Structure formats: structure tokens, C-alpha cells
């Protein structure tokens, strides 16, 4: 299932040589040559590599298994594919780029006319050096993708065509990793593993999800349990939901990770609910980050959030990305390569996800132990405690907001939004007020 990368210079890590960003880029580089699809050995190979870093449980679901209105499809595996001219030269070669074959192409081996072959060829006339990515998951046909320049060299009358593949009963494969917390309430983190040599969509998501899982597993304690899914797009989330319908009520927050390695601004697509805590948490993190960002309302197209947010489940799951699918020219082409994703962007994306998780972990509700009029802060040394801080005025105002809204019904995120203040400042203020006996946490 392996093949050489699509870009000869793609293995260079240009803007970071060490740290999480570089580590994630190296993981992307290792996964890049593998030919993945919605089923098959490419997915298994990918998950086995991830098992070196996180203890994924790999699930196999047999072909023909009914999953709601869908059925687990046949398993597809490919060994080789090419288009040869009369001299036996490979003009289009799967071994050089796995995007050359339409994913899920049925086996074919024949000699055919150029006219007949042309019906099975796909290129990008406006990007003559790029190879497109195409699939035919649920339509048994075959095809080749090639650059426009390659297409223009096919001037012979006949060609030998070979797709050495199998499409037969097998399994759908996905990986799952549950990190337990002090409660069984869960945060779902989902990414797709069904694309071949495409880096931003979605090797970047796989890399960030893996490192986020490593970060969470390394924490001394966690309030929530975290469930990570590495699944084939659409059919994977449908299959997981069908097999786990009884436990989805545990999911209190969720995010789909995709397209997080490019240099574009962050984009957050809200859950179907639109005002779920995860929607507010991500929006707050982005708003207070100082970075350019876009927040979109939910729409029923895109990635697996549309399955988690289907009306029968309506889970609070949004999609946090950088450039959305289809908004960058490299999307679903060979230009989505190792030079398109950058270590710095991967690192920033991981930090953004960590900030969201940190907010969810610490978003508690408190009540004032001195609710009748303002407590006298001076005699408790609270003014002195923040007086030497360059942000003293800001922290004093945060203290007043917390004391006023800590009535047992406002969460820290509520207070941060109302005060127009960073969540971290509000959380630090709460810790100070607890130390001075002015607040008590309201149990969940």
C-alpha cells in the first residue's frame, strides 16, 4: 500500500526543527505515502503506526453489516495500476503517486482505444501540473487521475490499462482510544483516516488528534473522559454511532479535527445546536486569542459533524479547522503535500485545541459565600495581592464580576463572556477568591 511521496522535496521541515510541530510534521511525513481509502490495508497500516504513540483499539466491522440506512461496503485493496503505451512505458503510474487511481476502482486489465480510455480520465485543466483526487466508493467503476500535462501526452491510438485491485467482502476498520476521567461524561474528538496522500485533508487532523490524546493522557487528572475516533469519513461515523447508540448520551462536547496544517486563519463550524457549551468555548478561545478567525453556523455538509449532529442524535459536536474544505486551491489535489502543511501551523492548531480542552475542564459554577453586598476586599488583602501586577485594574474588575455573578447559576464561561474577559483571568481570580474564603464550588 506504500508509494513514494507526491513531492520530491516534501520531507523538509522548514520552519521548526524540534518541538510538537516538528514531531507532528514527521508523523504526517511517515503516513503520507500510504494509500488509504474507506476500507483496506492502508487504514490498518495507518492505525498500527499510531499505536506506537497511543494505545488505539482497532475495530473490524464485517462487510454487509447494516448501520442505520447504510451497509458496511466491500473492502478495497490495491497493489498496482498503470497506463502503458505500445512500447510498454508507464505513462501513468500508481507507484509514483497513489492519487493516480480513482479510489475504489474495480479491477481492470485490457487494451483499449484512446477514445474509450478518455472517458475514465480526470485532470485539472486550470492547474496543469496538479493531480486531482477522486473516489467512486458506492459506484463500481474505475478511473485514473493525472495532470493536464500528462493527459496531453496521451496521443497514441491504443493503451494498456491495468488496475490490480480487489473489491471483496472484508471489513471496515477504525481506531478508538478512551482516556478515562473522574466522570464518565465524555468529550468526543473525531478525525477521518480515509484519504490517501493528502496532507492537510486529513493527515494534519490525524497528527493533531494523536498529539492532543498524548497531551491529555499525560495530565495528572481529568474531569472528563476523552474518546478519540480515527475513522473513515461518513461511513465510519455512521458505523460507530450504530454500534454505540446506547452510550452516545455520555458525549457532552465534541470536535471534528480536519485541515489544521495550512497557514489559513482558524475556522469554527458550530454544532447543529448553535449555542452548545462547545460552541461558546471554541468561540471564546478564538475571540480572545487575538488571531484572525471565522465562526460559521452549522450546515449539513462537510465532515463527520453532520452525522454526529443528525437529528436522531443532535450531539454537541462542532468542527474546528483552519482553511475549510474546498476553500484552498490545493484541496483534493496532489498539491496538498508535505510542503503545504507546516510545523508552525500544526503547533498552533494543537495549542488551540489544548486551550479549548482546558476551558472545558475548568468551566465550573461557583456561589459567593458573602452574597449580600460586596465583600470588603481590602481587609482580606485582596487589593494587595494584585496591586503589584501590571494588569491590576483588569484583575480587580474581573474580581468584581466574579463576585457579582457567582450566584450558583453562572459558569465561569458565562462570567467571562459577560465581562468580556479572558477565561484564564476569570479562572485565576476564582482561585484567589477561594483561597480567601469568598467562593464555593457548586457540585455538578
Image (cartoon, rainbow, N blue to C red):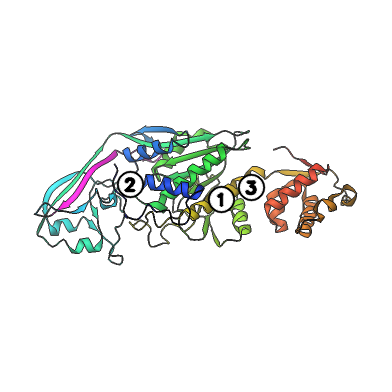
Q: Where is residue 125 in the image (x, y as percent from the top left)?
A: 27, 66
Q: Give the range drawn in magenta.
A: 68-85
The residue furthest front is 17
Specify whether residue 77 is painted magenta.
Answer: yes
Q: Position of residue 60 (x, y in %)?
A: 38, 32
Asked if residue 379 lies left or right of residue 51, the reply is right
Q: Distance between the residues labelled 2 and 1?
A: 27 Å
Residue under pointer 2:
33
Tell me the crowding category of disc 2: few under 14, some 14 to 19, or many 20 or more residues within 10 angstroms, Cα based.
many
Q: Distance between the residues labelled 2 and 3?
A: 36 Å
Front position among marks 3 and 1 = 1
Quarter of the picture holding the N terminus: top left
Asked whether 301 or 158 is in front, the reply is 158
Quarter of the picture holding the C terminus: top right
Asked whether 282 or 386 is in front, the reply is 386
Camera sees residue 63: no
Residue under pointer 3:
359
Residue under pointer 1:
351
Residue at 70 percent across and 43 percent down: it is 364
Amino acid at each position: 500500500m506504500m508509494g513514494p511521496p507526491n513531492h520530491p522535496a516534501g520531507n523538509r521541515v522548514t520552519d521548526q526543527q524540534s518541538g510538537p510541530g516538528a514531531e507532528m510534521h514527521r508523523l504526517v511525513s511517515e503516513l503520507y505515502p500510504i494509500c488509504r481509502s474507506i476500507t483496506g490495508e492502508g487504514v490498518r497500516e495507518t492505525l498500527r503506526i499510531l499505536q506506537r504513540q497511543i494505545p488505539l483499539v482497532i475495530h473490524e466491522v464485517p462487510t454487509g453489516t447494516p448501520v442505520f440506512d447504510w451497509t458496511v461496503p466491500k473492502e478495497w485493496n490495491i497493489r498496482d495500476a498503470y497506463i502503458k503505451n505500445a512500447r510498454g512505458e508507464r505513462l501513468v503510474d500508481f507507484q509514483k503517486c497513489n492519487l493516480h487511481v480513482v479510489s475504489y476502482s474495480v479491477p481492470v486489465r485490457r487494451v483499449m482505444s484512446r477514445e474509450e480510455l478518455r472517458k475514465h480520465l480526470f485532470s485539472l485543466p486550470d492547474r496543469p501540473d496538479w493531480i486531482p483526487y477522486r473516489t467512486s466508493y458506492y459506484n463500481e467503476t474505475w478511473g485514473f487521475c493525472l495532470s493536464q500535462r500528462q493527459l496531453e501526452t496521451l496521443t497514441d491510438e491504443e493503451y494498456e490499462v491495468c488496475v490490480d485491485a480487489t473489491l471483496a467482502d472484508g471489513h471496515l476498520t477504525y481506531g478508538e482510544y478512551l482516556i478515562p476521567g473522574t466522570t464518565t461524561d465524555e468529550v468526543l474528538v473525531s478525525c477521518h483516516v480515509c484519504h490517501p496522500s493528502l496532507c492537510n485533508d486529513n493527515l494534519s487532523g490525524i497528527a493533531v488528534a494523536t498529539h492532543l490524546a498524548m497531551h491529555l493522557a499525560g495530565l495528572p487528572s481529568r474531569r472528563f473522559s476523552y474518546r478519540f475516533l480515527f475513522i473513515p469519513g461518513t461511513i465510519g461515523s455512521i458505523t460507530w454511532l450504530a454500534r454505540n447508540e446506547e452510550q452516545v448520551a455520555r458525549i457532552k462536547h465534541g470536535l471534528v479535527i480536519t485541515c489544521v496544517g495550512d497557514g489559513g486563519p482558524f475556522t469554527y463550524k458550530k454544532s447543529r445546536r448553535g449555542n452548545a457549551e462547545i460552541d461558546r468555548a471554541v468561540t471564546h478561545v478564538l475571540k480572545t486569542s487575538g488571531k484572525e478567525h471565522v465562526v460559521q453556523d452549522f450546515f449539513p455538509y462537510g465532515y463527520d459533524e453532520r452525522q454526529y449532529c443528525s437529528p436522531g442524535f443532535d450531539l454537541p459536536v462542532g468542527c474546528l479547522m483552519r482553511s475549510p474544505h474546498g476553500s484552498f486551491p490545493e484541496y483534493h489535489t496532489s498539491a496538498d503535500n508535505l510542503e503545504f502543511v507546516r510545523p508552525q501551523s500544526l503547533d498552533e492548531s494543537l495549542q488551540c485545541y489544548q486551550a479549548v480542552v482546558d476551558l472545558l475542564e475548568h468551566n465550573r459554577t461557583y456561589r459567593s459565600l458573602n452574597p449580600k453586598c460586596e465583600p470588603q476586599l481590602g481587609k482580606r488583602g485582596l487589593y494587595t495581592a494584585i496591586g503589584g501586577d501590571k494588569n491590576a485594574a483588569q484583575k480587580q474588575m474581573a474580581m468584581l464580576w466574579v463576585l457579582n455573578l457567582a450566584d450558583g447559576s453562572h459558569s465561569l464561561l458565562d462570567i467571562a463572556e459577560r465581562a468580556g474577559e479572558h477565561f484564564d483571568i476569570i479562572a485565576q481570580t476564582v482561585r484567589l477568591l477561594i483561597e480567601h474564603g469568598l467562593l464555593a464550588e457548586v457540585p455538578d
